[in-house]
Structure formats: structure tokens, C-alpha cells
Image (cartoon, rainbow, N blue to C red):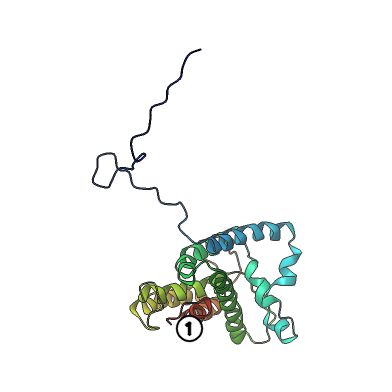
Amino acid sequence: MNAVYFEAPAPGGSRSPKPDEPRYRPSPEPIVNAPWPVVTLTVSIVVLYMLQRAFPFATDVLAFSPARLLEGHYVGLLSSQFLHGSWSHALMNAAFVLAFGAPVGRYLGQRASGVASFFLFYLTCGVLACLGFAAFHWGQDAAMVGASGAASGLMGAAARLIGGQGRPGRMLSQAVTGMGGAWILINVIMAFTGGALIPGAGDAGVAWEAHLAGFLAGVLLIGPFGWLSGQREM
């Protein structure tokens, strides 16, 4: 029988090269550097739009409408956030959620209270965005779908976190006024051009009112929701 020999490990086990040594290689960064609640929310936008395409009647039933709100149909305030008008609409909002949700998710944390606060913050911004849209279209039978208002809330919150270097900074910090001013300008343009500049929008209008209401909600509410998640500094 042939004997098989294994080289004994060096004393103390194997050691990774240090940064100043020739064989040092930095650890690869993850492809998606975002907390799992943000990734889950991003993927859910895409998956739910796939289901929506399979059951198109859901759009008429679950869209938000100011007229139906006055009739007591409140479910649209939440359900409309998970519906979209096209693939480009869904993918654009998914990208927004992933980009601006990452700093918000990291700030609120991944404990149970932080995860719950993140989803509640997102939905609250979406609801207030719908109400902002309704304020400009009071009683009209206009249907609105999309996560843009809630995603705008994440943008507003991210702006305050950037201004505060990871914690809620001043509401009128340079980051907030800069991002807010750019967002207002973009939405003013969309208010006049409608969906002409958005791929796949067709003749559909753009709910710019919801975008701006969502952004304002995010700026105002990230502090209280940070406290709710256990972050005591507001």
C-alpha cells in the first residue's frame, strides 16, 4: 500500500498577506452593497410587475384614484405603490429604490425594529405621495400607479443622511437643497412634457405632484422613523 503524505500546515495556520505585502489582494466588494430589506423591496417591484402583467385587471382594481378615495376606497393608497405602467417604469423605480434605499436601510439598521421602520417609512412616504397627488386632482377620476412617490421619499431621506454624514442632517443642508432643487426642476419639465421623455410611458401623464410630496415626506420623516428604529439622535 502506498502511503500518502500531506504537508503539515505552518505553525499558527495559514496567514493572509497584509496590504503592504506582494501577494495581497483586497477582498472583493459585493455586487449589491445594500441591506437585505432594500434588495427585497427592489426585487419585489420586478416580481410584482410580472404578476401584474399576468393579471392585468388588477391595475383597474388596485390603482389609486382621488375620486375613489372620496368614496372610501383607501386600499389604493397602498396597493398602487406595487403596480406599474410598463417595464421601463418598474425597472426605473426599482433602480431608484436600490440607490436611495441603501443609505436609509443602513441608517435604520437590520434589527427587527429597523427593518420594520424601513418598510413602514417607505409605505408612509408612498401614502403621503398619493395624498399629495389627490390634493392637486381633488375628486378627479384619475388613476395613478407606481412606487415613484415612495422612492422619492427614500431620495429625500438619503439627502438628509448625506447632509448629516450618515445621520439626519439639517433639513436645508446643501445636499437636501441641491437634490431637492434638481428633483423639482426635473418634475417641472415632466409636468409640461408628460411621458414624452420617459421610455415606455406612451400617452400616460407623470404624477409629478406625488414625486415632490414623497420627497418632502422623506426629508421630514427620516428623523422620527430613526427614533422609532432605535436611533436616538434625530
Q: Nearer the viewer, residue 125 or 108?
A: 108
Residue 200 seen anywhere in this rendered image of the structure: no
Where is residue 125, by image quadrant? bottom right
Residue beneath the point at 45% across and 20% down: 4
Residue at image mark 1: 220
Q: Relative to 1, is 177 above or below?
A: below
Where is residue 159, by image quadrant? bottom left
Find numbered disc 1 in the image and state the secondary structure of the residue it sits on.
helix
Category of crowding for the residue at label 1, using alpha-carbon neighbours closer than 10 angstroms: few (below 14), some (14–19), many (at least 20): some
Question: In what quadrant of the picture does the C terminus appear?
Answer: bottom left
Image coordinates for residue 85, horizontal then vertical, percent: 63, 64
Q: Nearer the viewer, residue 137 or 178?
A: 178
**Side of 88 where 5 appears, left or right:** left
Image coordinates for residue 127, horizontal then vertical, percent: 61, 79
Q: How many marks?
A: 1
Residue beneath the point at 61% across and 58% down: 46
Image coordinates for residue 122, horizontal then vertical, percent: 56, 73
**Side of 8 where 3 appears, left or right:** right
Residue beneath the point at 71% across and 77% down: 75
The residue positioned farthest toward the top in the image shown:
1
Residue 115 seen anywhere in this rendered image of the structure: yes
Q: Nearer the viewer, residue 14 or 51?
A: 14
**Side of 182 where 124 appears, left or right:** right
Image coordinates for residue 140, horizontal then vertical, percent: 68, 83
Q: What's the amino acid at mark 1?
A: Leu
